[in-house]
């Protein structure tokens, strides 16, 4: 991937081993070993949203197709916008908040209201890379107050007459429609967003998207013939939502304490990713790779590696159900 076009989720980290530990095969299981029933209650779909329905309607259809009670999406798309709509099933909805940290990428068509020199268009668009301020549009689900957002990159793919095809990487909560209007104002010609497609949410890309029809067909094959091949390729383990978040791996004995709301103590840490800073959100995993919880680090990676006691992270959200691992902590 071109280094000019990187989202925060593209940061490469290394895994450091603090201590050697083994996991008990009788408790929990690797995410890849989950049954279809377990995936339906704790998985997600990289859904390709079509133009027309709202994101809420898409989620309602997913629940109907898969015959489940609970689902949620990772970031609203306007009815006319297409593309990546991560849709979590059942308990996987607990992990959706991590997508707010991932960064998003869109490809869109901006329509200028009169012809402008290509050189000027490129110069003005460059000015919108970095920190920008936006006021949400009139028809939005949030309070209309001026707020700061980060544009990671803005690439002009093609300019044809008054149409500008672009690719933008931005912080979650950025309004691309407003961005186009603001660019048009600075160009002195006014502009509007003509078309938009979301191509990435962090590590979740349109290259691996599936349609709702694909999901329905796969579920029918599973229900009628017991064929799991297609449904397993459409519903992914919840842990893949965490791919862009730094990880802390804990020993089996620490898992259930976290599930019951305890903060993370250093003796429970087995492995940790590099470049974690104080205040960063991290995902806690078991030695089998299961998501346990989301935490906010109280220490840096280096401090956690060096110290032997004390707390290293405060609990933000529990992802794993209580009792998946034994309650060793109650006996101590």
Image (cartoon, rainbow, N blue to C red):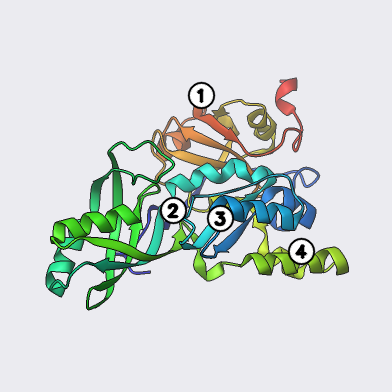
Residue 13's tag is: 2
The residue located at (66%, 35%) in the rendering is: 255
Real-space CA distance between mark 4 and mark 2, rounded to the nearest whole angstrom = 36 Å
Q: Earlier in the sequence, mark 3 or mark 2?
A: 2
Q: Residues within 10 Å of mark 4 (few under 14, many from 20)?
A: many
Task: Classify residue 20 as left or right of residue 181.
Answer: right
- The residue carrying mark 4 is 219
Percent across and percent down for residue 30 are 70, 52
Q: Is residue 111 above or below residue 276?
A: below
Mark closest to the chain's N terminus, 4 or 1: 4
Residue 129 in the figure: left or right of residue 51: left
Query: Is 169 on the left or on the right of 16, as rendered?
Result: left
**Quadrant containing the C terminus in the rendered view:** top right
Do the CB atoms of the residues marked 1 and 2 lie less than 8 Å apart?
no
Residue 310's tag is: 1
* Residue pictured at 45% horizontal, 45% vertical: 100
Q: Is residue 196 left or right of residue 314?
A: left
Closer to the camera: disc 4 or disc 2? 4
Mark 4–mark 1 distance (CA, rounded to whole Å): 47 Å
Q: Secondary structure at mark 3?
A: strand
Numbered disc in front, either 4 or 1: 4
The label nearer to you, 3 versus 2, is 3
Residue beneath the point at 56% across and 67% down: 209
- Going from N to C along the chain, the mark reached first, 1 or 3, is 3
SS under mark 2: loop
Q: CA distance from mark 1 to mark 2?
A: 25 Å
Comes first in the chain, label 4 or label 3: 3
The reply to whether residue 20 is visible in this rendering is no
Label drawn at residue 86: 3
Q: Disc 1 on helix, strand or loop? A: loop
Mark 4 to mark 3 CA distance (whole Å):
18 Å
Disc 4 or 2, which lies upstream in sequence?
2
């Amino acid at each position: 991937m071109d280094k000019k076009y990187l989202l925060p989720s593209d940061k490469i980290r290394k895994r450091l081993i603090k201590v050697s530990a083994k996991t008990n095969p009788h408790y929990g299981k690797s995410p890849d070993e989950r049954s279809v029933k377990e995936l339906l209650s704790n998985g997600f779909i990289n859904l390709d949203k079509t133009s027309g329905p709202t994101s809420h309607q898409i989620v309602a259809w997913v629940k109907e197709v898969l015959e489940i009670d609970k689902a949620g999406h990772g970031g609203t798309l306007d009815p006319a916008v297409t593309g990546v709509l991560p849709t979590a099933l059942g308990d996987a909805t607990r992990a959706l908040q991590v997508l707010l940290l991932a960064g998003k990428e869109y490809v869109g068509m901006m329509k200028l209201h009169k012809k402008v020199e290509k050189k000027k268009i490129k110069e003005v668009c460059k000015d919108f890379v970095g920190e920008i301020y936006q006021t949400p549009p009139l028809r939005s689900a949030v309070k209309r107050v001026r707020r700061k957002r980060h544009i990671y990159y803005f690439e002009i793919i093609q300019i044809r007459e008054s149409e500008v095809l672009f690719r933008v990487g931005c912080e979650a909560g950025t309004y691309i429609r407003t961005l186009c209007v603001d660019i048009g104002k600075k160009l002195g010609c006014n502009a509007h967003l003509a078309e938009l497609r979301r191509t990435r949410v962090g590590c979740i890309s349109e290259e691996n998207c599936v349609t709702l029809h694909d999901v329905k067909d796969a579920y029918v094959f599973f229900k009628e013939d017991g064929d799991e091949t297609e449904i397993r390729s459409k519903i992914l383990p919840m842990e893949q939502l965490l791919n862009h978040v730094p990880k802390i791996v804990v020993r089996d004995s620490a898992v259930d304490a976290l599930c019951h709301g305890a903060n993370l103590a250093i003796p429970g840490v087995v492995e940790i990713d590099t470049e974690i800073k104080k205040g960063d959100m991290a995902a806690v995993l078991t030695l089998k790779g299961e998501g346990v919880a989301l935490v906010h680090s109280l220490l840096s990676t280096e401090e956690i590696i060096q110290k032997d006691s004390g707390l290293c992270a405060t609990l933000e959200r529990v992802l794993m159900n209580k009792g998946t691992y034994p309650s060793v902590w109650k006996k101590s």
